[in-house]
Amino acid sequence: MPEPTAQMETKKVDAEGMLTNVRVIKKRYSGIEHGTLTLEGINAIVIHQTDSSTANSTFSSYKDSPRGIGAHFLISETGVVYQTASVEFIK
């Protein structure tokens, strides 16, 4: 296991399951959170691309989705990282 770096140490999770890194903007949509999960249970990251042209249009779909469809994180077209759901919940 590699030695922790200062950058690794700044990527912690608060009591609500939200990252505390200044590079991640919290924009939580609790309607897309479903079951519980622990960080130890995460063993993969899935990346997919939406058909939305902007981050705001993706956020609108999260808000308007009757089935609670969304993702934990969204990377905008300009590279801004948003956390949209707690890592303590499964989609």
Image: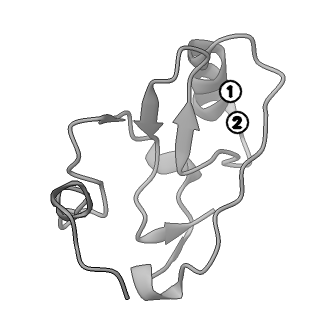
Residue 8: x %, y % from top left: 26, 62
Q: Which corner quadrant holds the N terminus?
A: bottom left
Q: Secondary structure at mark 2?
A: loop
Q: Which residue is mark 1?
A: 61
Q: Position of residue 54 (x, y in %)?
A: 65, 12
Tally of marks: 2
Quadrant in the rendering for residue 86: bottom left
Other-residue count near label 2 (Cα within 10 Å), few / some / many at <14 / 14–19 / ≥20: few
- Using the image as rendered, state which of residue 62 and residue 46 is in the foreground: 46
Callout in the foreground (1, 2): 1
Say which mark, if any, is on residue 65.
Answer: 2
Tell me: residue 24, above or below residue 36.
above
As drawn, the residue found furthest toward the right would be: 51
The residue lying at 57 percent from left, 25 percent from top is: 59
Name the residue at 29% across, 35% down.
Answer: 23
How far apart are the alpha carbons under marks 1 and 2?
6 Å
> Quick check: 26 above or below 15?
above
How does the figure colour the protein chain or chains?
one colour
Q: Is residue 57 above or below residue 70?
A: above
Mark 1 residue type? Ser
Q: Is residue 1 left or right of residue 11?
A: right
Looking at the image, which residue is at 52% across and 45% down?
Answer: 73
Verify CB contact (< 8 Å) between mark 1 and mark 2: yes
Quadrant location of the C terminus in the rendered image: bottom right
Whether residue 37 sits left or right of residue 61 in the image: it is left
Q: Secondary structure at mark 1?
A: helix
Q: Amino acid at mark 2?
A: Ser
